[in-house]
Image: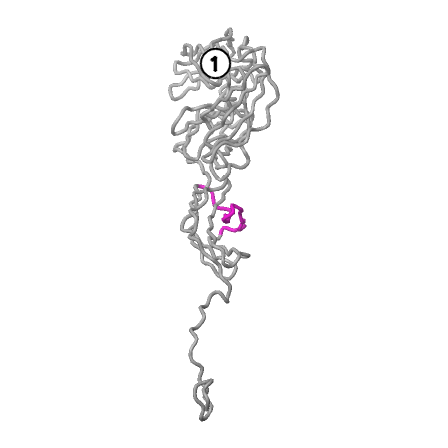
Amino acid sequence: IVNVLWSPPAYTGASQITDYIITEYPTNGTPVTIDTHSTYNSLTLSSMSLTTSYTFTVSAVNSYGDSLPSAPSNPTTPANEPTDPPSQFYSVANYPYAGMGTIVAATPNVDQLGLTGYVFNGCGYTNYSMSILEPIVSGTGPCTSAQVSSVSGSYTSVPFTFTSINQNLNTAPFMCNNISLSPISGGFSFSDSIDQGPPNGNNLPGVSDFLITVHPSTGSSYTDYFNSSTFNITGLSSTESYTFTVYCGNAYGWSLPYTTADPTPLAGIPFAPTGLSATASDSQASLSWTAANDNGSPITDYLIVMPDGSEIDTHSTNTSYNVTGLTNGVSYSFKVIAENANGYSLPSTASTPVTPKGLTDQFNPMTPTRIVDTRTNSGYFGQNS
């Protein structure tokens, strides 16, 4: 098994990322192209040779096509299947409310490669599968032992049995009950002011770990682990809405789950500006347009797209701009792109072509008329007197 991870591109080409393509290069073999069908920036590859070294490249995909491949990864050899269970376990016993019994939790063995999940037995659970070690809430009262095994593909490790149940309720966090969400590019920034004590109000220090489960409006949920009260969830789509379930933990156990009450829309790149019009004059054109829908994050700039594809940065959020230095007698059509903290919009519809003209080009000549000599006793000019 190999876990491939990468960072999203710094610039998305004015169109959001819709997919990633992985190319696998074995040292002795033919390259293999793998479509992730996902905007997540990681992929676990299985059924690989344990005696072959591999490198990988990744390309981003948007509505305009595929990017160039990334630089190759460092060579890596797939990890063997796990032979040991996770290395460290936390637990806390019997919260005497809401009909709940023991809350048992385990922390991942972060040094172990190739893991695809865990199996938990005990505290009222039988062969309970999970993708990441998470808090287990027993509704049957306190339990005194449990077992957990690591899973990699079809292989399950020998179980680890733990029986250390901490009876001091005042040392476990109660709930992550003050979650703050802020949209960032491709995701959310989280911060938490934690109520770290049980219902009796004793707030104690020591919270260091967080588990957060991401629930998209479509697709599968997944869980991430963090060891800071401020962290970012990225790789999300601006076309989805999300709810989040958060647990906070310390050396004695995990809190009750806190779930955001309403789906939270992710701020995305702006929509394309509309209503673009252009008016030509001597060597210039005056543009105006309707402000772009900011899609949840304020507009920070507009760019003018010239007929040759070059761009003029207006350095402004104004919805008008004077394009100067144009050639009189040449037809021009323009487009506008909006920018916010999450990236660039698609270009607007092109303006109707306009042609700048010089001052002497803007007037039609008068029709010639007869010239009359107004002197006394004279007739028309050129006539003999």
Residue nearest the viewer, comparing 303 with 296: 303
**Magenta includes 297?**
yes
Which residue is label 1 attached to?
A: 118
Image location (x, y in percent) of residue 289: 43, 52
Residue type beneath disc 1: Tyr
**As drawn, which residue projects farthest toward the front?**
384
Image location (x, y in percent) of residue 160: 51, 8
Image location (x, y in percent) of residue 159: 50, 7
Q: Residue at x 56, y 19 (%)?
A: 25
Region rendered in magenta: 296-317
Residue nearest the viewer, comparing 3 with 58: 58
Q: Is residue 177 above or below residue 354?
A: above
Residue 23 seen in render = yes
Image location (x, y in percent) of residue 184: 50, 37
Q: Is residue 212 above or below residue 297?
A: above
Give the quadrant of residue 241. Answer: top left
Residue nearest the viewer, comparing 182 with 139: 182
Q: Is residue 114 above or below residue 326?
A: above
